[in-house]
């Protein structure tokens, strides 16, 4: 059995994971078949390592994972960080002041660097339901007391797309701003993306962009699609990602990744967007 790619890169939320944070047996089987055919599966997620590790362990995943929007390359088998890029806190603070000068006060959360980095949640920030741990802090200054991977922002009135657009216009070239999921707008180091982390990990695996098939669902996956040979958006994907995808598959709830992998394993051509 042959497979036309050496590397299969998958986002987690809204892509590999179903709404209940599980991976279906069909998708697990398709990934196992791809591995048997000689291709590597690599997780590429906006989640930092502490919020990703339990999923990797459930999958029996021992390879490299790109976490924190590309900031971290993590070796799951060895449980160690190979690379970790942090956000310049002074630049981030300046960027946030520029955003607030344009659109008013923001609610903030922050992801601390490291294998056990906590997510600190400031006053007014709405945390989504789920099992992921967060530490609530009353003093926003506490969020800036240790190295960070990213800062999350929320606005009382603007939706995700409007907030990301306004923030991007306000910060200039100080930092990057991405919309990574429902209710998740992030401030990142300038130039950081899933593509930068994936290219580092791929090099370690002996793979190139031309060898890579990528799956995603949100605007933060756009750089990864631009880097990879073939980008597949889920049916539930944001319209901005669908616009740049080479193909649109079924939703994360309907085994969209498996649909594509099974077809490629059968030697059938790629679909069209």
Image: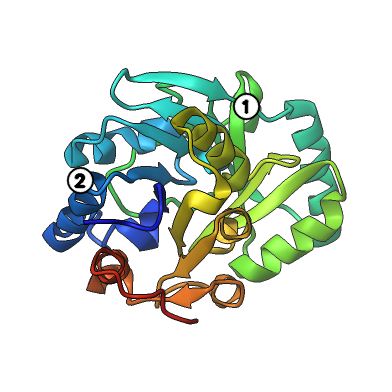
Task: Kindly indicate the quadrant of the structure image that contains residue 229.
Answer: bottom right
Residue 73 image position (x, y, % from top left): 49, 29
Report the Cα–Cα distance between label 1 and label 2.
33 Å
Q: Is residue 135 visible?
A: no
Secondary structure beneath label 2? helix
* Residue found 44% across the figure and 32% down from its top: 205
User: Going by the picture, which residue comes out furthest to the left?
Assistant: 25
Which of the labelled discs sits on residue 85, or is there none?
A: 1
- Is 78 left or right of 84, judged from the image as shown? left
* Nearer-the-camera pick, 123 or 5: 5
Q: Which class describes the residues within 10 Å of circle 1: few (<14), some (14-19), or many (20+)?
A: many
* Nearer-the-camera pick, 244 or 127: 244
* Residue found 79% across the figure and 52% down from its top: 100
In the rendered view, tell whether residue 89 sits above or below residue 125: above
Residue 10 image position (x, y, % from top left): 40, 53
Q: Which residue was labeled with disc 2? A: 36
* Residue found 26% across the figure and 41% down from its top: 55
Residue 5 image position (x, y, % from top left): 41, 54
Q: In the rendered structure, are the residues bearing label 1 and label 2 in contact, judged by CB atoms less than 8 Å apart?
A: no
- Is 66 left or right of 87, judged from the image as shown? left
* Residue found 41% across the figure and 74% down from its top: 270
Q: Which class describes the residues within 10 Å of circle 2: few (<14), some (14-19), or many (20+)?
A: few
Task: Kindly indicate the quadrant of the structure image that contains residue 199.
Answer: top right
User: Going by the picture, which residue comes out furthest to the bottom?
Assistant: 272
- Is 31 left or right of 51, judged from the image as shown? left
């Amino acid at each position: 059995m042959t497979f036309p790619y050496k590397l299969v890169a998958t986002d987690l939320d809204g892509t590999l994971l179903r709404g209940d944070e599980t991976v279906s047996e069909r998708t697990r089987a398709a990934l196992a078949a791809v591995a048997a055919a000689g291709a590597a599966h690599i997780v590429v997620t906006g989640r930092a390592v502490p919020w990703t590790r339990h999923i990797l362990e459930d999958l029996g995943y021992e390879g490299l994972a790109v976490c924190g929007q590309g900031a971290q390359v993590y070796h799951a088998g060895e449980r160690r960080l190979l690379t970790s890029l942090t956000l310049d806190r002074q630049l981030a603070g300046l960027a946030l002041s520029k955003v607030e000068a344009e659109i008013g006060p923001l609610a903030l959360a922050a992801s601390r660097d490291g294998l056990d980095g906590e997510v600190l949640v400031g006053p007014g920030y709405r945390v989504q339901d789920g099992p992921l741990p967060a530490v609530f802090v009353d003093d926003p200054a506490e969020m800036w007391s240790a190295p960070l991977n990213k800062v999350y922002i929320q606005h009382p009135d603007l939706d995700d797309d409007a907030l990301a657009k306004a923030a991007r216009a306000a910060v200039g070239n100080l930092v990057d701003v991405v919309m990574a999921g429902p209710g998740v707008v992030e401030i990142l180091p300038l130039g950081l993306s899933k593509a930068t982390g994936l290219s580092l990990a791929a090099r370690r695996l002996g793979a190139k962009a031309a060898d890579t098939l990528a799956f995603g669902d949100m605007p933060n996956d756009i750089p990864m699609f631009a880097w990879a040979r073939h980008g597949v958006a889920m049916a539930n994907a944001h319209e901005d990602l669908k616009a740049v995808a080479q193909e649109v598959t079924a939703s994360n709830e309907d085994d969209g990744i498996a649909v594509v992998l099974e077809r490629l394993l059968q030697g059938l051509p790629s679909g069209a967007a």
